Each structure stands twice: as C-alpha cells, then as structure tokens.
Image (tube, rainbow, N blue to C red):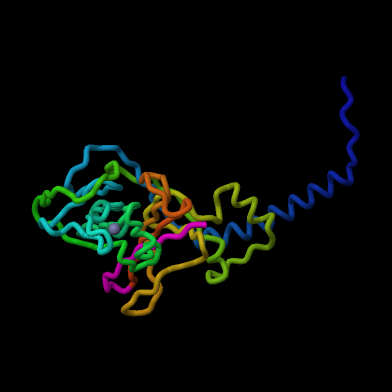
Amino acid sequence: MKKGLPIDSSLLQQGEEKFKALMHDVESTYAIFDAHKRKAYLPITENVKMAFSEHSKIGGIPYLRNENDWPICENCQRNMDLLVQLNLADIPEKAEEGLLQLFYCTSKETDCTSVLEGYLPFSKASVVRKIVAEGPSSKVRPNLTKVFQEKVITGWQVQFDYPHREEYDVLGIEIPHDGVFDYLYEQKIGSPIRKDKLFGWPNWIQGVSYPKAPKTGADMQFLFQLASFDHLAYRFGDDGTGHITQSVHGSGQLAFGWACH
Ligand SMILES: [Zn+2]
C-alpha cells in the first residue's frame, strides 16, 4: 500500500471549520436572495425570412399600421432599425393586447448614436412604443441600407434571475463577505443574467440607472434586456447592454437606454 502525504490534522480541521462557517453564511444569504429572485424569460428564436408581421421578433421588419408608421430618424432621415417587437399577447406573465416595438437608428455613416446621444433614455435615436395591430400590416420599402436578420421568438426559457450587486444596498441585501458572493456567483445566484431576456433583473453596466418617468418622476420598471451580439448582430458601444423600461403607473411611458464599459 502506498503511503499518502503526511497531513497536518489541525490544518485539516481548520479548513473544515472555515468551510462550515462559509456554508452557514451562504445559507443565510441564499435565503435573502430567494426573497428577491424573479423569473427571467430568455427568448428562443428561429431565423426567418423577414416579413411585416405581428410576431414577437428580434431584428427584421415591424408590423405597420399604415404606410407612414415606420419611425424616421431625425438626424439621417432614414427609417430606424427594428431591434425588438413583442406581441404582448404572447409573452409569459402580464400578457396584454398590443405590440411593443423598439426602433433605434444604428446608422454608422451619420453616427446618429453620438449625435443624438442614443444611449440615453428618451433619446431621439430611439422610439419605443406600444401599438394596437388592426388588420394586416402595411408594406413599405424601407429607407435602410441593411436590415437585421429577422429572428422570430418561438418560445421562452425560464430562469431565476437576481439583482445586480449595485442594487443590493437599496434592496437591503447584505453579503457577510466576498467569499459568500463568489461562492453564490459560481452557482449563478446573486447576479443578473447577461443575455437577452424579458423580465427578471437588469444587468447594469454603469451603475443602477432606472430612468425616471417624465410624468410622475417615479423610477421606471425593467421590461426587456438586449445584450450586444446575443440575438441581434449589433454592438452597443463597447459591448454594451440595453434596457427597455416602462412606467409603473399605467401612463404608458416607455424608454430605451444602454450603457457600456
Ligand atoms: Zn439616424
């Protein structure tokens, strides 16, 4: 029989006690996170030929109520790109009538993102709106050099999601020490998912930045996250992440903003 390495049993015991203490802290912290977890829905998509349709989709072309319904960028006078369209009757939880559409001008030649400060919520580089579809969509030839690959959302993958570390203070979440955070992080607990998703918690890049609803001044609520090069072949600045938010008190205000490192 081979002899193993000599083991200092006191060290082993110390290690075991440290581990027990860590697990104790992890369990109490886990209970706190459990109270704050939300369901996030990650889109499952299929590449399709673009169509003026009412489907939930990322990229492609929108449903249009009439021939003049496709928003035009003030800076370059071209049609804005459709980034996301959600048929709200199809979404999990809080289903309602109507289509949510996010348009954004990605034109590089005219650099509309910089000129219009497109990263800011309520920038003129973006239009977020809820519309009601009535009858088949109007069909127009878009004034655009390129349209993003249309990806129809065929389903949603549900995952638990947790607030960003920058939100812990406001939520009253206290982490005993970094060891606990790191342990939970590895288990995908305690941090927001970084991909495209509906609901859940936003993955903030430059600190917590819920826009204020212009009418009420209240924080707007997170609705949809769009990450650089997840489903949409577009990079927000330097690998940024964008968020659609909506006003809480039914005033129907919507916003889109993004941030990068
Ligand atoms: Zn533009």
Residue 181: % across, % down: 63, 56
Q: What residue is shown at x 12% (from left), y 50% (from top)?
A: 140
Of 112 and 187, the residue lying toward us: 112
Give percent across and percent down for residue 144: 23, 49
Residue lying at the far front of the rendered structure: 109
Farthest top residue in view: 1
Image quarter where the N terminus lies is top right
Magenta residues (range): 249-261
- Residue at the image position 17 percent from the left and 47 percent from the top: 53
Left/right placement of residue 16 relative to residue 129 reads right
User: Total marks drawn?
Assistant: 0
- Whether residue 151 sits left or right of residue 159 in the image: it is left
Residue 245 point in image, percent of width and height: 36, 64
Q: Quadrant of ligand 1?
A: bottom left
Task: Using the image, determine if residue 170 lies above or below residue 70.
Answer: below
Q: For this rendering, which residue is in front, 33 or 179?
A: 179
Is residue 118 within the magenta segment?
Answer: no
- 260 inside magenta stretch: yes
Q: Nearer the viewer, residue 24 or 98?
A: 98
In the picture as drawn, the residue positioned furthest to the bottom comes out as 216
- For the point 52% across and 65% down, the residue is 207
Quarter of the rendering containing residue 190? bottom right
- Relative to 139, is 121 above or below? below
Kindly identify the residue that appears in the image at 38 percent across and 70 percent down.
Answer: 220
Q: Is residue 62 left or right of residue 31?
A: left
Q: Could you tell me residue 198's position as x and y percent?
A: 37, 54
